[in-house]
Image (tube, rainbow, N blue to C red):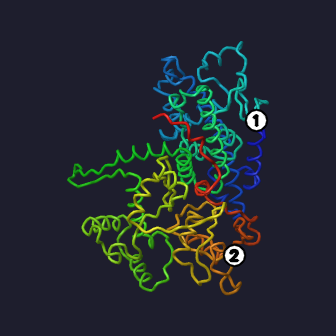
Amino acid sequence: MAFFSELAQHLEVLRDALGGDVEAEQLPLALDRLSDDGVVAALEAATGLVRAGEKVRIAASGAAAARSTREAGHTGLAQKRGHRNPASLIQEITGATRAEAAKHVRLGESLRTLAGIDPGRDAMTDASDPAVPPYEGAGAGVGVGPGPRAGVGAGGEPEPWHAPLGRALLAGAIGSAQHDAILRGLGEPPEPDPVATSGEDDGLDAVARAREAWREAWMLAAEQLIAEARERTVEELGRAARTIRDQLDPAGAQRRFDQRFEGRAFRLWRDADGVRRGSIVFDDLGGAWAQTIWDSALRPRRGGPRFVDSEEKARAEELVADPRTNDQLAYDLFLDLLCAGALADAATVFGARQAGVRIVVPADAIVQERSGAPAVALVEDDQTVLPAWLAAQHMCHTATRHVTVDGGGNPLDLGREARLYRPKQKIALAIRDGGCRWRGCDRPASYCEAHHIDEWVRDEGRTDIDRGILLCRFHHMELHHGGWRITREGLGDFVLHPPPGRGDPLVLVPRLALRLAVFDIEPPPRRFRLAG
């Protein structure tokens, strides 16, 4: 759809929802008079308008950045207006934060690359010179003229790997925050090391083929994350992008792990009033431990699963009734752990359930790790990537569970026929689902309850893995009390059915990062050593 036609369509929907033109100061009252469906329609139309306007702001930010380079000196667009850089200019005009302005510049530059605009082009001179025609390929894949074929940029050069992101942004399929989360999460593909192929007859061609394989893998990952965007929050989308990047590039994952490990730090100081303060920079495993300890201790206060055991339930109720704030409880927990050390009593320190980090290690990762090849494993709750050697090290002194899954991630060989899901079954559900499967929910597996999609009593439902699904406490209660239901045909997709009149059924898509741990995108050929 043409840009101004899109704007007009959103404006018409919004005008109809509000019943015509209204004064700005009357907007709260006009919206308050709408039905629930009217409020949602107005919100959707307003979001469409914001996204449409944001496209212009992002593209204009890219153009401003191209005209404000250091080489332009004081004649640059931003510099002539008294700003050191384009982000400062954009911040003044838009009233955005510095981080938001920098994001607009980053995305604008990405769109210019997609449009086939040469980064070295003198944008100021060309823009003011009527003799210079529009840049060839400027509409590539963006709905502005035909442009080159998909996958190929201006001049027959391959498109950048992030081209699908730019097209999805301009088409309104994703917003700028989603675009930025995927772009930053995936980062740039690794660069093959020419030294690794110097002994081959076609060494240069081999490097080019490896570079193309990485570009295609990153482009495919971007496309799959775009499809995932409707199902996930922006924060979870960014985590998924980082996890997929590390799965595709385990050697790079090891380097990033090492950098974060080297950056670990703990500092204590006194402020001007004499109050002792502290700060911690975690490495990956240390951060996972701290998070799971905090979650385990505060889960009853933060919407964790309900307890069935009477003693656990009583301790959870005591914690909910505790007059301390969550921050105060976390502080007291931290001191209790320092004092009690590894012998901390679970009932005293952790409240209802002792903490522990559960790591998912694909079978082939163990094989690769033993052969000396780079491989990765995932933390169950948030899919943080860890080196497989670290998981193997922890397997030496912790319990392990073997879970066999099919090509769709469905567990095949765990327990059946009990009223409640057993701990081993919940492990399998956590590996398959990764957390609450409700669309847009990012609650981790440790905060979820196992739901029987076939009711135990009414439908003679079985407590089988393939008939269960993880839902957080809120969505589990919403399903039972709000008229929703979940169905599944065989080992197909789980489908969420809303109450009558609330829309169409929704497929509950499994998390992409976990799907890729089992099957799907393969890393580029491992024979190419990555540059350090």
The residue under the point 57% across, 71% down is: 474
Image quarter where the C terminus lies is top left
The kind of residue tagged 1 is: Gly
Left or right: 130 in relation to 94: right
Q: Earlier in the sequence, mark 1 or mark 2?
A: 1
Residue 200 position within the rendered picture, expressed as x and y whole percent measured from the top left: 57, 28
Image quarter where the N terminus lies is top right
Q: Indicate whether 245 appears above or below 340.
A: above
Instruction: Give the Cα distance between marks 1 and 2.
Output: 42 Å
Q: Quadrant of residue 53?
A: top right
Residue 177 position within the rendered picture, expressed as x and y whole percent measured from the top left: 58, 46
Q: Quadrant of residue 155?
A: top right
The residue under the point 64% across, 59% down is: 29
- Outermost residue toward the top? 131
Left or right: 256 in relation to 23: left
The kind of residue tagged 2 is: Gly
Q: Quadrant of residue 3?
A: top right
Residue 230 position within the rendered picture, expressed as x and y whole percent measured from the top left: 66, 54
Front residue of 198/177: it is 198
| Secondary structure under the numbered disc 1 in the rendered image | loop
Residue 437 position within the rendered picture, expressed as x and y whole percent measured from the top left: 61, 65
The residue under the point 56% across, 41% down is: 526
Disc ID at residue 483? 2
Front residue of 77/348: it is 348
- For disc 1, the marked residue is 143
Left or right: 344 in relation to 155: left
